Image: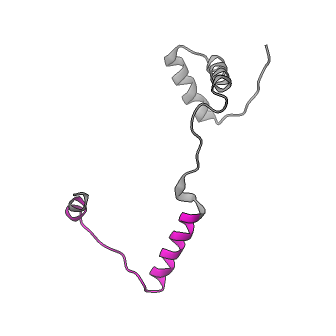
Amino acid sequence: MANVSIRVDDVVKRQAEGICSELGLSLSAATNLFYKKMISYGGIPFELKVDPFYSQENMEHLERAINKYYDGKSQPVYKDMAELEEMEG
């Protein structure tokens, strides 16, 4: 049996331990399950993706919108809750 040493944020570790405890597992058993699932899945067994908000395309769009506002080419739109609810349709 091999030993694996990893560094994990204290809060993350406590939260994971709590979940494992409710499931009747130790962190070691949960880690072994993760490794086995990764092997059978042939990769990370869940989707990994970057938040699209921070994509280069969106950052450029936001920068253009901010520049239009600062250049006086656009103005904020103010709506109250009733108007927003109407927009939902």
Is residue 72 magenta-colored? yes
In the displayed structure, would residue 35 be above or below residue 87?
A: above
Q: Position of residue 16 (x, y in %)?
A: 57, 27
Q: Residue at x 63, y 27 (%)?
A: 41
Q: Residue at x 63, y 34 (%)?
A: 10
Report the quarter where the N terminus lies. top right
The outermost residue toward the right is 2
Q: Which residues are magenta?
A: 57-85
Q: Position of residue 40 (x, y in %)?
A: 65, 22
43 displayed left or right of 4:
left
**Rendering quarter of residue 27:** top right
Q: Main secondary structure of the magenta part?
A: helix
Q: Position of residue 56 (x, y in %)?
A: 60, 63
| The one of 20 and 34 positioned closer to us in this rendering | 34
In the displayed structure, would residue 5 be above or below residue 83?
A: above
Q: Position of residue 73 (x, y in %)?
A: 43, 85
| The one of 22 and 85 positioned closer to us in this rendering | 85
